[in-house]
Amino acid sequence: DADVTQTPRNRITKTGKRIMLECSQTKGHDRMYWYRQDPGLGLQLIYYSFDVKDINKGEISDGYSVSRQAQAKFSLSLESAIPNQTALYFCATSAGTATTDTQYFGPGTRLTVL
Amino acid sequence: RKEVEQDPGPFNVPEGATVAFNCTYSNSASQSFFWYRQDCRKEPKLLMSVYSSGNEDGRFTAQLNRASQYISLLIRDSKLSDSATYLCVVNESNDYKLSFGAGTTVTVRA
């Protein structure tokens, strides 16, 4: 079984709808991240959490919110989806030191907002 | 200006060839460096860390040039399975957040 899972894997929604993307991990890591990937761009950090009580905005947090329900679960919400939020979304976890940190990614959620 | 810049390629090479490409980073205080591999529409996975002295992992060699602020990846004896996008990743401030380049695409042909 995969260590980092994401649901749903694909989602098509309409402008203005609320949508939640979920991430679960069995690696026991404290740190979790949400990224989006657009063609021709690097992964952009949306939000990150270093433990259940620590949640921080990334470089592109506007229009998104998150919830860290437990060490193993970190969900991303789009309160009112818009077409330019169409992208591939990845959740990741990590646990190393800053210089040796490896991030482990989930399989991604492909979101289309019409 | 992007923190991490890469030549997007694609680099099209025959099997057995050597291919090399660079990545530049803008923050001279950057602490640690990595190459990740991403197959089409799949999640990125760590390929290797990049150390100051340079390091090798099988057919892959990574180098860091702090003076010129770039890292490089060289793939020897390319295999078809090396076809992927290679992401240059930099930890700019030692705070567990990573900056990703947009990736360099390598296609190895038979």
Image: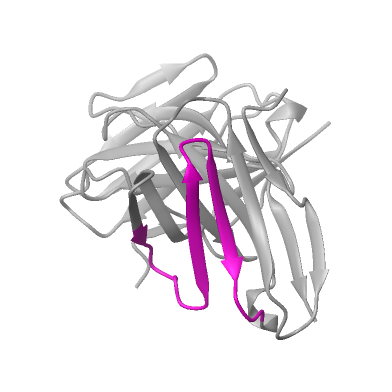
Which image quadrant is residue B55 in? top left
* Of residues A85 and B25, the one drawn nearer to the viewer in this rendering: A85
Q: Residue at x 69, y 72 (%)?
A: A86
Q: Is residue A98 magenta?
A: no
> Which portion, as a residue range, is magenta?
A56-81
Q: How many marks?
A: 0
Q: Can you say which quadrant of the picture contains the C terminus of chain B? A: top right
Q: Residue A74: say if magenta.
A: yes
Residue pictured at 72% horizontal, 79% vertical = A17
Which one is nearer the viewer's eye here, B72 or B14? B72
Image side of residue A6 versus residue B32, left or right: right
| Residue B32 screen position, x and y as percent | 27, 38
Q: Position of residue A29 (x, y in %)?
A: 43, 30
Could one spot residue A108 in this view of the protein? Answer: yes
Confirm whether residue B99 shows in the render: no
Q: Position of residue B10 (x, y in %)?
A: 66, 53
Q: Residue at x 49, y 60 (%)?
A: A66
Quadrant in which the N terminus of chain B is drawn: bottom left
Residue displayed at 68% across by 45% down: A6
| Residue closer to the observer: B53 or B36 | B36
Residue A18, x across and y down, in percent = 68, 75
- Residue B93, relative to residue B46: is it above or below? below
Give the residue furthest to the top. B58
Judging from the image, the colouring scheme is one colour
